[in-house]
Image: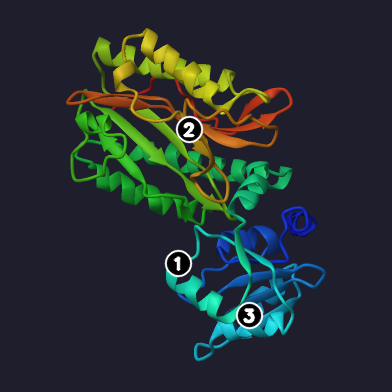
Amino acid sequence: MNNALTSLEQQMAGEGLDALLVTDPKHVYYLTGFASDPHERFLGLLLIRGEEPMLILPALDAEAAQAASSVTKIITHSDTDNPYNLLKDCFGSSKLGTLGIEKEHFSVARFEHLTAAVPAERFSDIGPLLRSMRSKKTPDEVKRIKHAAELVEEALRRVLTHVKTGVTENDLVAELEYLMKKVGASGPSFDTMVLSGPKTALPHGVPGNRVIQPGDFLMFDIGVYADGYASDITRTFAIESVDDKLVTIYNTVLAANEAGIAASNPGAPFGSVDKAARDVIEEAGFGEYFLHRVGHGLGMDVHEYPSLHGQNDDIIEIGNVFTVEPGIYVPGLAGVRIEDDLIITAEGAETLTSFPKELTILHL
């Protein structure tokens, strides 16, 4: 984490930044090692070029910040203070040219408070700079993501024993989220998705009280947070038996998943991963039923840069972590998605998820 802060400080001059203010709690954690959810209270990491970094946070978080943060200059505010006045005091009377902020994270109200307190001449968006830094994962980050993948796979392995006569999608969601905590995760990294039968044809379907039935496909799209990093995996199973068309759909998605992984090489455009998977599905005659991009970046957020759609010409780099998750969704019939998490190395893609992908029949 310290290395990231040092790198950011070194890039300020080249970016034309006199100062920058980081307010997204995940980015504060990324840069300092201090993780918190300030809710509505103000949290900010302030870097003024040539000065010691400052961490401004609620007084109730002071002890935790002192224990975890690599930034030692900590400024606190109480619930009755105006934190923007503290910001103003930090800048003093010096004239400020360009202040970098995270435009996607700042609400209009907060920006108005900021501009009233800090009369910078210009405000520059540092979101792209932070996104670029986060897109290349360190070995420590990869270790955390892999650990998150191991935990969610263990939860999935255990929940399969609960697929029995009379069980509903919501029953399995509840059991999964209990197991996620039981195996050591902080919690789910997104809303846990368990879909069955025709509902598997909904890429973003909502679990309900539908009872799992023979002949169904049963889809789990699940992930967890562990040590601040996310995992994301999808596996689709058959209940008792499925007909030949569904087996064909499953095997087509599996081949597309493997083609996307094989195309994930440093130096190739991200769009080529989508194309490799999509070509398999289109050649099998199911092209109209592949409704979304093939994957997305993964790290501190479950969805982050890059977006692996067919028009993304950005180049895959060593250290990128992303998902490959092709799917086929036939309305009124069923759907299949198979998703893995990858890290890009000099040799190509290393798969961080290891749960078996061949079509598995579950018996009630």
**Residue at the spot 51% in from the left edge and 33% down from the top edge:** 323
In which quadrant of the rendered image does the C terminus lie?
top left
Q: Name the residue under label 1.
A: 107
x and y percent of residue 347 in the render?
Answer: 72, 22
x and y percent of residue 239 in the render?
Answer: 27, 26
Q: Is mark 2 on a helix, strand or loop?
A: strand
Q: In which quarter of the image is residue 216?
A: top left
Cα separation between marks 2 and 1: 29 Å
The circle on residue 87 is 3
Q: Is mark 1 on a helix, strand or loop?
A: loop
Q: Give the mark nearest the N terminus, 2 or 1.
A: 1
On the question of residue 348 being in view, the answer is yes
User: Looking at the picture, which amino acid does disc 3 mark?
Assistant: Leu
In the depicted view, which residue is nearer to us: 257 or 103? 103
The circle on residue 312 is none
- How crowded pointer 1 is (Cα within 10 Å; few <14, some 14-19, many 20+) is rated as few
On the question of residue 364 being in view, the answer is no
Considering every residue shown, the one lying at the far front of the view is 121
Of marks 2 and 1, the one in the foreground: 1
Q: Mark 2 points at which residue?
A: 295
Of marks 2 and 3, the one in the foreground: 3
Q: Quadrant of residue 336?
A: top left
x and y percent of residue 1 in the render?
Answer: 72, 57
